[in-house]
Image: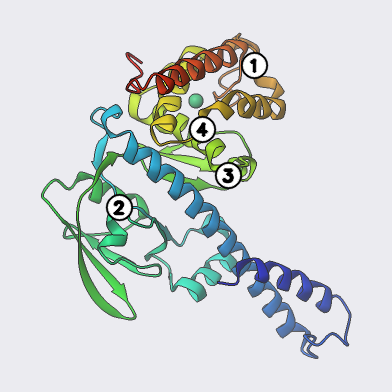
């Protein structure tokens, strides 16, 4: 892996192509030089997003596997992989780079990250594998892949892969976990209402903004809580506080330090001043994503954190009660 080096190399190439003809990387063929430069940038971007997705995978995997009994009927076998398909939203240079690095071509689904010790890891699935079939059904999207695996109820999940142009079959031993899968979305801090089936997105902005995995766990667990509790129907402070409550329990269950929650959400609020009101009409739920940090929510988060910390100290089970 040469991910961080690739970024500095790309910047170096940018300056070299800007006119320093004595630079050792300079080439008389300006067009070729530009192509190489853009390929370096696109590959650096792929590696950056893969690192972010791998971080999201690690945190969401820990939360989903530790909270299985809190997820009601939103439970199914977890794989422990991040898989990408070519998507025009990221632009052609990005996906050409994806093809160069991972062999992902249009329409294929490739594994770009694996959680160590996960069922997929133990079954021998590797980074770069193309997923052809899950449980006998052809895979047409990353959603397809996770939905088919999560719905399988008949023992080890048969998966057909393409590796080095050879078809390989593996059997993934099922591990039950909370079912909603976390996907990465390019965007700022605003968590959106967008979802893919019963799955959810975390924006690249939030992954960057979360200084530690304890902080990222707060975002992932909050979004997961929305997905497993059907808390999308009537947006507003009470729905957010319910998602915070279940989310904080889920994060604590996975061993994350939830004492960082008040300060973290305070920092998020500084970025989103329009959401600092309990009056839903005041900032218009229809206009902005419903993740405001109203005063009632801030107070509730502090109370819930104290309640969970008391239970941890008293070695009581981390059960949130009725959500
Ligand atoms: Zn929310």
Quadrant of the image for the N terminus? bottom right
Give the foreground label among 2 and 4: 4
Judged from the image, the secondary structure of the residue bearing numbered disc 1 is: helix
Residue pointed to by mark 3: 207
67 vs 237, left or right, is left
Find residue 160 and report its horizontal and vertical position in percent.
Answer: 23, 67
Q: Secondary structure at mark 3?
A: helix
Q: Is residue 282 above or below residue 150?
A: above
Looking at the image, do the residues carrying marks 1 and 3 touch, with CB atoms under 8 Å apart?
no
Q: Is mark 1 within 8 Å of ligand 1?
A: no
Looking at marks 4 and 3 on the same chain, the residue that comes earlier in the sequence is marked by 3
Tell me whether circle 2 and circle 4 mark residues in contact (CB < 8 Å): no
The residue carrying pointer 3 sits among few (fewer than 14), some (14 to 19) or many (20 or more) residues within 10 Å by Cα, namely many
SS for dot 4: loop
Give the image location of residue 254, x and y in percent. 40, 36
Of tags 1 and 3, the one toward the viewer is 3
Residue 232 visible in the displayed image: no
Mark toward the start of the polypeptide (2 vs 1): 2
**Which residue sits at x=39%, y=43%?**
62
Q: Which residue is mark 2?
A: 79
Of the numbered discs 4 and 1, the one sitting upstream in the chain is 4
Placement of the C terminus among the 4 image quadrants: top left
* Residue found 56% across the figure and 36% down from its top: 215
Separation of residues labelled 2 and 3 (CA atoms): 22 Å
The residues tagged by marks 2 and 1 sit, at their Cα atoms, a distance apart of 40 Å
Mark 4 — residue?
257
Q: Secondary structure at mark 2?
A: loop
Residue annotated with mark 1: 283
Measuring from the top left, give residue 51's x and y in whole percent. Answer: 54, 57
Cα distance in 3D space between marks 4 and 3 = 17 Å
Marks 2 and 4, the one that precedes in the sequence: 2
Q: CA distance from mark 1 to mark 3?
A: 25 Å
């Amino acid at each position: 892996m040469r991910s961080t080096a690739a970024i500095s190399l790309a910047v170096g190439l940018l300056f070299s192509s800007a006119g320093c003809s004595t630079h050792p990387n300079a080439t008389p063929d300006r067009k070729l030089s530009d192509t190489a430069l853009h390929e370096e940038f696109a590959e650096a971007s792929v590696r950056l997003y893969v690192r972010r997705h791998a971080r999201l995978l690690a945190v969401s995997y820990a939360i989903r596997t530790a909270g299985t009994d809190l997820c009601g009927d939103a439970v199914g076998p977890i794989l422990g992989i991040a898989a990408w398909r070519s998507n025009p939203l990221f632009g052609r240079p990005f996906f050409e780079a994806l093809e160069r690095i991972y062999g992902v071509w249009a329409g294929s689904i490739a594994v770009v990250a694996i959680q160590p010790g996960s069922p997929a890891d133990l079954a021998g699935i590797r980074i770069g594998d193309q997923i052809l079939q899950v449980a006998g059904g052809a895979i047409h999207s990353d959603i397809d892949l996770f939905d088919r695996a999560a719905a399988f109820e008949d023992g080890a999940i048969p998966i057909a892969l393409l590796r080095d142009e050879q078809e390989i079959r593996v059997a993934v031993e099922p591990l039950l976990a909370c079912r909603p899968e976390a996907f990465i979305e390019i965007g700022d801090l605003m968590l959106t209402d967008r979802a893919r089936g019963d799955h959810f997105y975390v924006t690249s902005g939030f992954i960057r903004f979360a200084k530690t995995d304890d902080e990222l766990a707060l975002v992932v667990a909050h979004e997961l809580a929305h997905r497993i509790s059907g808390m999308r129907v009537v947006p507003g402070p009470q729905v957010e506080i319910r998602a915070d409550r279940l989310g904080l329990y889920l994060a604590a269950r996975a061993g994350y330090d939830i004492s960082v929650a008040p300060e973290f959400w305070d920092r998020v609020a500084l970025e989103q001043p329009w959401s600092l009101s309990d009056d839903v009409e005041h900032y218009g739920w229809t206009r902005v994503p419903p993740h405001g940090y109203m005063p009632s929510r801030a107070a509730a988060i502090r109370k819930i954190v104290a309640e969970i910390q008391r239970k941890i100290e008293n070695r009581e089970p981390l059960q949130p009660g009725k959500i």
